[in-house]
Image (tube, coloured by chain):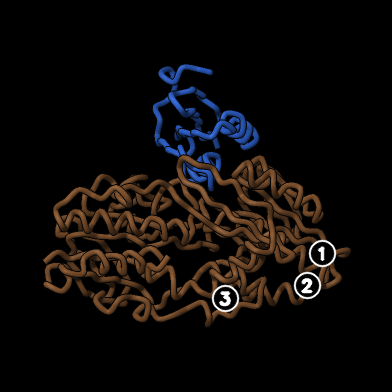
């Protein structure tokens, strides 16, 4: 029997498991293949919804569902904390002592945030990368009576590159609606030399920043917080004062990947082949989603488009054939919505060869994002889109 | 620019070809943050803007640009983390 072990029950892990069931139905029925997902909580979280807890009236309980309910019944689910991958014996060790062997290993272990890596983050800064933090940000915004709001980034890479821009736009719109705009300033700190990394998108959003009166500070990568003076300092040597600070926290890969020798310290991102998604040249170990070191957006969308490739490569290996043409290689496809505020949005779609050409912001793409958020549970994890 | 052969060995190579989001400069900033002082990082970029964007950031952040070479279909930019 071939054992496929998938670590992580997020978008990448769940979708890969369900797609594998579709491809290997016969082998599963014959008992020739077993598919197991290991997840640390047994709960699947729709992380793009966190921003809407802070900005759009979303509720945390609507963003979480049982992983068991999303997985095909032919997939086994083990709830537990992974401690180590032992490559010589092809075994995964869990914290409770359980050992799980594998013939094919899929690392869909995501990323983790480390606000504690920046001194004073916990007392001085807000973020929206957990449901709890997003709700605290909502409460802080509710109590805000005017002043200087600074949105900045304290580490690279981070999940969803457009998110801090979206939050800047949405906050500015909210301040206007609440009659606080005249008493407030909104500042956005870009890590690079323009407002956004993609030139065409930057050209689109720069006039929007100007029109909304949001000041953009370029080449500003936050290095430290001075809690006494309420000032942030950048690694480029500049300072900026704030009354309210919204900071994207540093992100890393999972520690057990470093401890197991699969990913280098300090980042913990898995060295992943950009086409085959194999890890470090290993023929039977694959990675997808945030966990990889690929130069792509850390976003559910990336995992969504990588999962068919991991699935096809494992199915092909089990069936003793070459990977098919359609999903044999990952071509770098990513697609994500981008909120502009005032009920408008746009869409970024690109791959390794084709830069995005975002349409002019309109209500349709904003509504598209809302519909996607609502229908996610029935579409993406089950492999229907 | 200068000849890479006369300069310190490359500690890490970041292949950011085809990276539109987050993009080669963001990948370099991540690499610099993770690197030790004295490490030398090479970035491959197929984004034409990198030839100007990346040296600008290196100067602003106070690191050292060692080389900027045009290869077939991409640029290689080599930088040393100095602080």
Subunit of label 3: A
Point 27% across, 63% down: residue: A84
Subunit of label 2: A
Determine whether the residue tagged by mark 2 lies in a helix, strand or loop.
Answer: loop
Point 29% across, 71% down: residue: A37
State the CA–CA distance, disc 3 to disc 2. Answer: 18 Å
Where does label 1 land, which residue?
Answer: A147
On whether disc 2 and disc 1 are found on a single subunit, the reply is yes
Q: Is residue B39 left or right of residue A224?
A: left
Q: In this view, does A302 lie to the left or right of A169?
A: left
Front residue of this view, candidates A21 and A364: A364
Where does label 2 land, which residue?
Answer: A144
State the CA–CA distance, disc 2 to disc 1. Answer: 8 Å
Which circle's residue, 3 or 2, is located before the other in the chain? 3
- For label 3, the crowd category at 10 Å Cα-Cα, with few meaning under 14, some 14 to 19 and many 20 or more, is some
Where does label 3 land, which residue?
Answer: A132
- Is residue A226 visible to the viewer in this orientation of the structure? no
Which circle's residue, 3 or 1, is located before the other in the chain? 3
Q: Which chain is brown in the rendering?
A: A
Quadrant of the image for the C terminus of chain A? Answer: bottom left
* Residue A186 picture location, percent across and down: 77, 58
Q: Which chain is blue in the rendering?
A: B
């Amino acid at each position: 029997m071939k054992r496929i072990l998938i670590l992580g029950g997020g978008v990448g892990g769940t979708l890969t498991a369900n797609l594998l069931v579709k491809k290997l139905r016969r082998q599963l029925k014959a008992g020739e293949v077993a598919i197991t997902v290991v997840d640390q909580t047994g709960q699947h979280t729709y992380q793009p919804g966190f921003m809407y807890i802070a900005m759009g009236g979303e509720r945390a309980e609507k963003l979480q569902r049982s992983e068991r309910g999303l997985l095909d019944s032919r997939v086994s689910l083990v709830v537990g904390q992974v401690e180590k991958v032992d490559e010589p014996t092809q075994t995964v060790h869990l914290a409770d002592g359980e050992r799980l062997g594998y013939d094919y290993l899929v690392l869909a272990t995501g990323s983790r945030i480390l606000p504690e890596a920046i001194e004073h983050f916990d007392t001085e800064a807000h973020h929206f990368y957990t449901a709890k933090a997003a709700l605290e940000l909502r409460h802080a915004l509710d109590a805000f009576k005017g002043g200087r709001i600074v949105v900045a980034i304290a580490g690279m890479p981070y999940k969803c590159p457009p998110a801090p821009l979206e939050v800047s736009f949405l906050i500015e719109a909210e301040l206007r609606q609440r009659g606080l705009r005249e008493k407030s300033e909104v500042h956005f700190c870009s890590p690079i030399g323009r407002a956004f990394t993609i030139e065409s998108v930057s050209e689109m959003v720069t006039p929007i920043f100007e029109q909304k009166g949001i000041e953009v500070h370029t080449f500003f990568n936050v290095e430290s917080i001075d809690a006494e003076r309420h000032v942030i300092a950048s690694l480029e040597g500049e300072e900026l004062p704030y009354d309210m600070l919204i900071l994207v926290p540093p992100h890393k890969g999972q520690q057990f990947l470093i401890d197991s020798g699969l990913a280098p310290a300090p980042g913990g991102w898995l060295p992943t082949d950009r086409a085959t998604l194999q890890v470090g040249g290993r023929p039977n170990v694959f990675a997808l989603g945030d966990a990889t070191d690929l130069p792509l957006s850390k976003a559910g969308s990336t995992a969504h488009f990588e999962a068919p490739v991991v699935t096809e490569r494992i199915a092909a290996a089990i069936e003793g054939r070459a990977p098919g043409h359609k999903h044999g290689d990952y071509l770098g496809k990513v697609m994500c919505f981008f909120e502009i505020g005032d009920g408008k949005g746009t869409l970024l779609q690109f791959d390794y060869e084709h830069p995005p050409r975002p349409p002019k912001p309109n209500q349709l793409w904003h509504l598209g994002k809302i519909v996607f958020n609502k229908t996610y549970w029935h579409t993406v994890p089950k492999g229907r889109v | 620019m200068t000849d890479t052969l006369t300069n310190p060995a490359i500690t890490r190579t970041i292949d950011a070809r085809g990276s539109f989001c987050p993009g080669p400069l963001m990948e370099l900033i991540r690499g610099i943050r993770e690197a030790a002082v004295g490490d030398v990082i090479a970035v491959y970029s197929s984004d034409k803007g990198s030839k100007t964007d990346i040296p600008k950031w290196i100067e602003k952040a106070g690191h050292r640009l060692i080389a900027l070479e045009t290869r077939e279909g991409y640029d290689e930019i080599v930088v040393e983390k100095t602080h």
